[in-house]
Amino acid sequence: MKTIVLILSAFLSLSAFADCGAAYSNQIKNIEGRMNPPRTTVISNIIAEGAVVGTLAIVGTIPVTAVVALPAAALGAGAYYGYLVAQRDGLRNGMHLIRDAHKGSGKTLERFMKILNRKSDVEYDRDEVINFIVQSDFDNTFCELNEIKDTYKVLTFRKILHHAKKELAI
C-alpha cells in the first residue's frame, strides 16, 4: 500500500511539474517573442529618427531641444530590452531549479544552495530545501493559475529564493 501511495505521489508531482513546466516554457517564449522586435526594429527606428530629427534641427524646422528626446527614447528601449532579458533569464533559471530539485541534483540547484547559504546566518539542509521546492511545485506555489485570465503566474529564480528564505526560516 505504501508503495502505491509513493508511486501515485510521484506521478502527481510529475504531472504538476508538467503543467508548471509548460507554463514556464510559455512565459519564456512569450518574452522571447517580445525581445526580437526591439533588437531589430526599435534600434533601426531610433537611428532613422535620429537622422530625421538631426536633419530637421539643422535646417531649423524643429527646435534643437527635440534632439534631446532621441537619447531618452534610445535609453527607454534599451532599459525595456534589459528588463526582458533579466525576466527571461530569471524564469529560465527558476524552471531549471525546479527540474534539478525533482532530480535531486544539478547546476542550478547547487547555485541556489550557495546563494541561500551565503546570504543567511544559518546553514540550510540540502534535503530540506529540495523537499521544500518539490512540495511547493506540487502545490503550485511557484506556478499559480490566474483563473480570470486563464494564465499562470510563474516565479523567477530570485522570487523562489526569497520564498524559500521566508518559508524555511529557522
Image: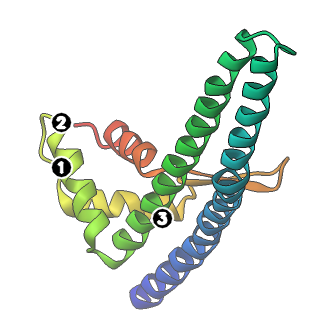
Direction from residue 33 to residue 142 in the image, left or right: left
Alpha carbon distance from label 1 to label 3: 21 Å
Image position, residue 135 (x, y; %): 44, 62
Which residue occupies 42% across, 51% down?
157
Image position, residue 35 (x, y; %): 65, 55
Element type at mark 3? helix
Dot 3, crowdedness within 10 Å: few (<14), some or many (≥20)? many
Element type at mark 2? loop
User: Mark 1 or 3, which is nearer the eye?
Assistant: 3
Which residue is labeled 1 in the image? 124
Report the number of discs.
3
Which residue occupies 28% across, 75% down?
104
- Tag 1: residue type? Tyr
Alpha carbon distance from label 3 to label 2: 23 Å
Task: Specify which label sits upstream in the sequence, 1 or 3.
Answer: 3
- Tag 2: residue type? Ser
Determine whether label 1 and label 2 are within 8 Å by CB: yes
Which residue is labeled 3 in the image? 95
- Tag 3: residue type? Met
Which residue occupies 18% across, 49% down?
124
Does 62 appear above or below 111? above
Question: In what quadrant of the picture does the C terminus appear?
Answer: top left
Dot 2, crowdedness within 10 Å: few (<14), some or many (≥20)? few
Alpha carbon distance from label 1 to label 2: 9 Å
Dot 1, crowdedness within 10 Å: few (<14), some or many (≥20)? some
Pick the residue in front: 80 or 131.
Answer: 80
Direction from residue 66 to residue 155 in the image, left or right: left
Which residue is labeled 2 in the image? 120
Question: In what quadrant of the picture does the N terminus appear?
Answer: bottom left
Direction from residue 143 to residue 125 in the image, left or right: left
User: Mark 1 or 2, which is nearer the eye?
Assistant: 2
